[in-house]
Structure formats: C-alpha cells, structure tokens
C-alpha cells in the first residue's frame, strides 16, 4: 500500500469519526425535551405502605410510622428497641373514662411504664394531661371538659386523691384536701350556694 493510499484511508477514517461526533452533538443539543423526559426516572407522587421503619447506623429500629391497633402513630424507640414516645391516636385511662380515645403524646420509661400523656379526646369531650410515677400510679392530672368544667388533682403513692382544685361554670372555684381514707380534711368554699349564679 502506497503512502498516498494510506493518506486517503486516514482522511476517510477522520471524516467518519467527525460525522459520528457531530451527530452525537446534534442529538444532545437539539433532541426534544420529551425525549429527555422519557429517559429520566419517573417521579413518585404517592406511596402507600403499611409502615415505615427508621433504623440507626447499626440497623437497630429507632422509629416507626404505622397504623397500630389504636390508630395512626409515630413511635420513637431507644437503642434496645423499646417504645419511649408515641404521637398520634392513643387509648389512655383518664379520670373521665377508663378508656379515652386521645390524639396526643404518650411518654414511656425504659420499664414500659407510662409516665406522661397529654392531648385531646377524639370526641372533643376532654383535653388535659396525666402523669404517672415509676410504679405506674397516677399522681397528677389536669384537664377541662366540653361542659366547661376544669380541675387539677394530685394523688398519693396509692393513687388516692389527696388534693384537688375544681372550676365549674355555676359553682365557681373550689379546693379540697383529703386524708388516706378519702375523708375531707378541708374544703373551700364550705357552701356551694356561695357561688350560685345571680338571680337564682
């Protein structure tokens, strides 16, 4: 093969490569946006799952978002996987009802004992807060009902009411101290009619 033939072949190869590069640039620069849209991964606008689990660097579950037997909840767990905080629909014992359906917050200690809850009843009948001690005994409660009644209660280590403050629409405020047998030690006002509405 002569040098002239080699030069001609070289030019042919160069022209062919230039054509390929030029064609590629044309496609990249002038291809329609629709073509690119088809090539991009689709965007998920809605996702349906039964629950979401969040794990830490050691693959230990530390958070859960799910619909539990009580209702939708966000649950935070400690390093041992024990639930320590719940936010959402809860079922908790209150002074008004043994099983009140709440929307609120529930905090639990490492032993699984409820220590604090607060929120509003699902039916709108009550809003308030309850605290338990480390033995699970209810020691403090405060709340208001949809009837306009409100109050604060403090219990002893046996769960017996020892001190209470109440507020009612027609009788006003009251305060009461009780002994361990439930007998009243001191009460104010001493007469309910002191706070009766005017004109009655």
Image (cartoon, grey):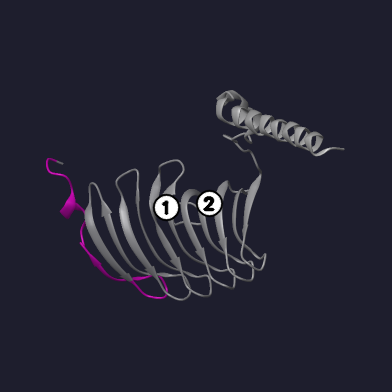
From the viewer's side, name the closer residue of 55 and 183: 55
| Secondary structure under the numbered disc 1 in the rendered image | strand
Residue 98 visible? The answer is no
In the rendered image, the vertical position of residue 181 relative to residue 106, given as above or below: below
Residue that appears at 61% across and 71% down: 79
| Secondary structure under the numbered disc 2 in the rendered image | strand
Residue that appears at 78% across and 35% down: 4
Gap in angstroms between the C-alphas marked 1 and 2 = 9 Å
In the rendered image, the vertical position of residue 115 relative to residue 121, given as above or below: below
Question: Quick one: quadrant of the C terminus?
Answer: top left
Q: Is residue 130 magenta?
A: no
Residue 12, position as x, y percentages in the image: 75, 31
Q: Which mark is residue 90?
A: 2
Please tell me which of labels 1 and 2 falls first in the chain. 2
The residue positioned farthest toward the left in the image shown: 199
Q: Is residue 182 magenta?
A: yes
Q: Is residue 82 left or right of residue 121?
A: right
Which residue position holds label 1?
119
Residue that appears at 67% across and 64% down: 59
Specify start and end residues of the magenta stretch as a single range.
Answer: 178-199
From the viewer's side, name the closer residue of 200 and 28: 28
Residue 154, position as x, y percentages in the image: 37, 68
């Amino acid at each position: 093969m002569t040098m002239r033939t080699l030069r001609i072949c070289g030019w042919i190869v160069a022209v062919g490569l230039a054509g390929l590069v030029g064609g590629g640039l044309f496609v990249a620069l002038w291809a329609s946006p629709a073509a690119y849209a088809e090539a991009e991964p689709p965007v998920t606008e809605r996702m349906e799952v039964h629950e979401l689990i969040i794990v830490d660097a050691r693959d230990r579950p530390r958070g859960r978002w799910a619909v539990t037997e009580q209702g939708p909840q966000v649950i935070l767990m400690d390093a041992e996987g024990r639930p320590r905080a719940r936010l959402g629909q809860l079922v908790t014992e209150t002074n008004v009802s043994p099983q009140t359906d709440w929307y609120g917050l529930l905090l639990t200690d490492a032993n699984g004992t409820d220590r604090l809850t607060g929120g509003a009843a699902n039916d709108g009948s009550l809003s308030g807060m309850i605290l338990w001690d480390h033995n699970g005994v209810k020691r403090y409660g405060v709340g208001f009902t949809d009837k306009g009644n409100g109050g604060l209660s403090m219990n002893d280590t046996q769960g017996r009411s020892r001190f209470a403050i109440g507020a009612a629409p027609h009788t006003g405020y009251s305060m009461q101290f009780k002994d361990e047998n439930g007998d009243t030690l001191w009460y104010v006002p001493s007469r309910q009619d002191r706070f009766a509405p005017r004109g009655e």
